[in-house]
Image (cartoon, grey):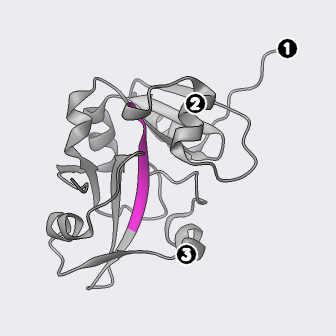
Amino acid sequence: MKDKEIKTNAIRILESNKISHKSYQYECKEFTDGLQTAKMLGLPPERMYKTLVTEGKSKNFYVFVIPIEQELDLKKAAAAANEKSVEMIPVKNITLVTGYIRGGCTAIGMKKNYPTFLDTSAGAFSEIIVSAGKLGAQIELAPADYLRVVNGTLADLTRV
């Protein structure tokens, strides 16, 4: 018997916008880091991206999407967002701000359309892999399509 495909908000949004994508599912009951996810799915970790949510000095929220093996450079992030400074929101606030849970957070279909920035490294790949908005679900799509659906911007965001 084939498992029923998980339909998340993010996947429905991609389908309604006729954006080509591939979805992956895996057994996951709690937060696992991106490297474990890549290993479980047999996917190249360098194409997997994590979604981070920050709050700027102005109290506005910003979303940064970076490779799973990298760290967000807060100074670069602030510059991209045109803010004096940004800081990560507390884990306990992720669901409140985004509508998603830790480990299942994606910029596609958040509660609000926060300014979203994708690391320039994504330009090196024909497809990137991001969370599908639920633990145990990932989606693969072209970086240009991702940027279009989240109304995002490419920016240099990671520590060297």
Instruction: Say if mark 1 contacts mark 3, CB within 8 Å.
Output: no
Q: Estimate the x, y position of residue 76 in percent, counting from the top left.
A: 18, 64
Tell me the distance, in whole angstroms, between the alpha carbons under discs 2 and 3: 28 Å
Q: Residue at x 58, y 59 (%)?
A: 102
Which tag is nearer the camera, tag 2 or tag 3? Answer: 2
Q: Which residue is mark 3?
A: 93
Q: Seen from this angle, which residue lies furthest top?
A: 1
Secondary structure mainly formed by the magenta segment: strand
Residue 132 in which image quadrant: top right
Name the secondary structure under disc 2.
helix
Tell me the distance, in whole angstroms, between the alpha carbons under discs 2 and 1: 24 Å
Q: Residues within 10 Å of mark 2 (few under 14, many from 20)?
A: few
Residue 145 visible in image: yes
Q: Residues within 10 Å of mark 1 (few under 14, many from 20)?
A: few
Please name the amino acid that badge 3 sits on. Answer: Asn
Q: Which residue is mark 2?
A: 39
Name the secondary structure under disc 1.
loop
Q: Which residue is mark 1?
A: 1
Q: Is residue 25 magenta?
A: no
Left or right of residue 38: residue 26: right
Q: Residue at x 28, y 23 (%)?
A: 126
Q: Estimate the x, y position of residue 145 in percent, counting from the top left.
A: 30, 34
Q: Is residue 48 magenta?
A: yes
Q: Estimate the x, y position of residue 117 in percent, counting from the top left.
A: 26, 54
Q: Residue at x 20, y 67 (%)?
A: 81
Residue 72 in which image quadrant: bottom left
Please name the amino acid that badge 2 sits on. Answer: Lys
Q: Estimate the x, y position of residue 123 in percent, counting from the top left.
A: 20, 33
Please name the amino acid that badge 1 sits on. Answer: Met
Q: Residues within 10 Å of mark 3 (few under 14, many from 20)?
A: some
Magenta stretch? 47-53
